[in-house]
Image (cartoon, helix red, strand yellow):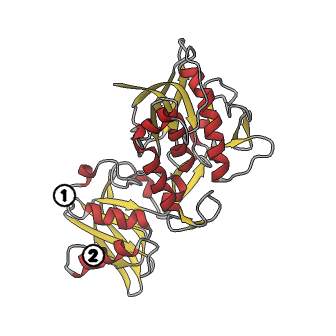
Amino acid sequence: MTKKTDIVIIGAGPVGLFAVFELGLLDLDCHLIDILDRPGGQCAELYPEKPIYDIPGWPVISAQGLVDKLMEQIAPFKPEFTFNRVVAGLEKLADGTFRLTTDENEVFEAKAVVIAAGGGSFQPKRPPIPGIEAFEGTSVHYAVRRIEDFRGHDILIVGGGDSALDWTLNLQPVARSVTLVHRRPEFRAAPDSVNRMRALEASGDLRFQLGQITELRGSDGALTSALVKGPEGETEISCTRMLPFFGLTMKLGPVAEWGLNLHENTIRVDTEKFETSTPGIFAIGDINWYPGKLKLILSGFHEAALMAQAAKHIVHPDERVVFQYTTSSTSLQKKLGVI
């Protein structure tokens, strides 16, 4: 089933989220697609507690705090999100509409496309475990797309960050058993998540194993157990599903195949509209390049504002765009729900 919208935004990081606000002021509907399982991009996934000092009006704000504020800001425009997806294909139809296809064969159609994918798409790092490739896609997964797919399984989760702890807690109620493996007793996750995990460990509802995976056992893609080398030797853990969270790498990904004018793994754009070499496709944030480019979140916010004005002309070419200020326009304030 094809989903239709005014604008598809590829990437739900801070710049993609702010683009929703600027486009929403112009009555344009947005659908965001992101490879991660939540909004926020690098800010949410890699350093949620990192302080940011150069957001106007905020002497200091955490990365996750910024994402939370942006989500609050765009709430009046009711954007739609599709997570855990990669936009694998993009084509321009005869009527000028763009058709986008995800790696799960979902189809979206939009009048304009905004690429706000940061440094590119996040790709999970494969752990250095011999023969892991034979189990990928059947027993070994790098993301949870449907919790029900893990119901009743013996789940082995590997890692010590927020993703590992979050999924340990979220899957424990539906799994037959959950074992969390980390190479050291300290975690990089939110303290509350660690405390909840420790409580479940103390009650016997999950197992924590200190060490590293050295071998996977099973056949025909079906995992049966894993060997863990820890301080006291090697332990075999029964498991039918494994979720390794070893961090992410960033690649330009399928975007590189879309025929856009590239500059050293970034997308060249103009500085009037932040449009790419393909009319109707825009690139904002760290994914783009132009002379004098600064890879700052605040630069991406500026780019989103100018992009939105150009996108409005593409989606509604017959409508006159009247520039308004949110401080004085009652129509904009009504859209924002403040009057």
Q: Secondary structure at mark 1?
A: loop
Name the residue: 55% across, 42% down: 327
Based on the displayed image, in which of its 4 quarters is residue 209 positioned?
bottom left
Q: Is residue 68 left or right of residue 94?
A: left
Counting from the top left corner in percent of width and height, residue 111 is at 52, 22
Determine which quarter of the picture holds residue 196: bottom left
* Position of 161 relative to 195 (above/below): above
| Residue density around tag 2, few if under 14, some if 14–19, many if 20 or more, within 10 Å | some
**Closer to the N terminus: mark 1 or mark 2?**
1
- Residue with the mark numbered 1: 152
Name the residue rendered at 30%, 74% in the picture: 197
Give the farthest residue toward the top: 94
What amino acid is found at the position of numbered circle 1 in the picture? Answer: Gly
Query: Residue 231, can we see it?
Result: yes
Residue linked to disc 2: 207
Please state, as top left, top right, bottom left or bottom right, where the C terminus lies in the image. Answer: top left
Of residue 280 and residue 317, the one placed in the foreground of this image is: 317
Instruction: Please indicate, yes or no, whether residue 103 appears anywhere in the rendered image.
Output: no
At 55% across and 68% down in the image, what residue appears?
50
- Residue farthest toward the bottom in the current orientation of the protein: 232
Residue shown at 67%/48% (left/top)? 299
Q: Position of residue 234 (x, y in %)?
A: 37, 80
Q: Position of residue 195 (x, y in %)?
A: 32, 78
- With respect to residue 188, does 120 lie above or below? above
